[in-house]
Image: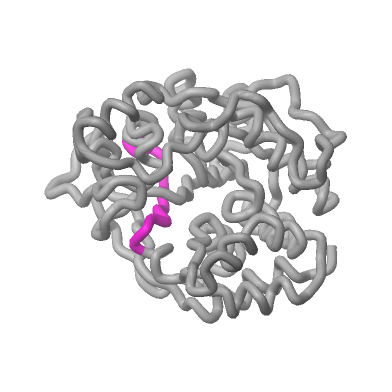
Amino acid sequence: MRPTHRIIFDTDGAVFNDDAAALAMLVQRRDRVELLGVTVVAGNHRTPQAAEHMLHLLELTGTDDIPLYLGARNPLVNTAARAASQETQWGPISFKGAFDAPRDVVAPHSGRFATTRPRTTGAISFIIETIERYPDEVTLVAVGPMTNLALTFRARPDLAARVKRLVFMGGNARVPGNVTPAAEFNIWFDPEAARETLAAPIPETVMFGLDITNHAPLHKTAFDDIVAIDTPLTRLMQHDMAPRFRRDPAATYHVWDCITAAWLIDPSIVTSSEALPISVDTTFGPTYGETRVSDRTSREVRPITVMLDLDVERFYQIYAGLLTRPM
């Protein structure tokens, strides 16, 4: 029996939490998810560094048969200079990701680079070829800025209607942002790409924004229970996440992308959602990158399914079960 989802996983990378953890969850359920490829975009990290973290994760899980492709190295419009100007004029930006990242690429936690290397085909070409090969079957799972997707639909606007669905982590419909009072990081890093992608005629778009992800922070007690079970994944989790808990036992982590991955495996974890017209603010100012509920729909503002709440206990059962599962 074919898996439920054929997925392209579009990511800005992470050492572990949260992009890498989400990918780890999905590769542990290849009975449910057919991962056609991983495409990398600038966001949390510069694209080459993000790729190294994701290649390490694939090698660690024994799934390095899944191809990885390098995508956009810069947002469509936003730049480090614009971010600095925004901060000077309108207040702090709590995380600027690749804009602040060093240019040198370092080996992941293993201390060595993965044997498997990125494919020579670029991410945009791969996405186009894959949608053409599997029309109406591909789910685009975007857990970073949407630059790769915007560039894909700029090159081939006809293909947006042949995507099965877009599932993305990003945005904030009715809650404050997390990098500025207005904006969530993935959208803020490339608002123009998000605006173009969300306006594309994709048959179904599902948003996992801060409205739902804020409801399931990871506390030290649950973290300790998970890393007490020794697996390659929990060792990586310990390396990446334990320092914060050592500094502050009352700290929490948000596991944004992991909730998106868990829903793909078990949709029943989401308990509340609503179809809402979501617009993206691309005016350079204090609300740059904000996603807001519009008072009208238009060709550029299309209704999307916004996830609002979840069964937190069921989510953490899936999360812990997959990260501690033998590989």
> On the picture, is 245 further left or further right than 146?
right
Provide the residue span drawn in magenta: 198-211
Q: Quadrant of the C terminus?
A: bottom right
Q: Position of residue 27 (x, y in %)?
A: 73, 55
Going 18% across and 44% down the picture, which residue do you hit? 297
Viewer-nearest residue: 245 or 166: 245
Q: Position of residue 174 (x, y in %)?
A: 24, 59
**Does the magenta portion include 295?**
no
Viewer-nearest residue: 30 or 27: 27
Q: Is residue 237 visible?
A: yes
Going 60% across and 34% down the picture, which residue do you hit? 40
Image mark count: 0
Residue 77 sits in quarter = top left
**Does the magenta portion include 203?**
yes
Going 81% across and 46% down the picture, which residue do you hit? 110
Viewer-nearest residue: 145 or 241: 241
Residue 70 sits in quarter = top right
Q: Position of residue 313 (x, y in %)?
A: 53, 81
> On the picture, is 326 further left or further right than 28?
right
Residue 30 vertical placement versus 229 (above, below): above
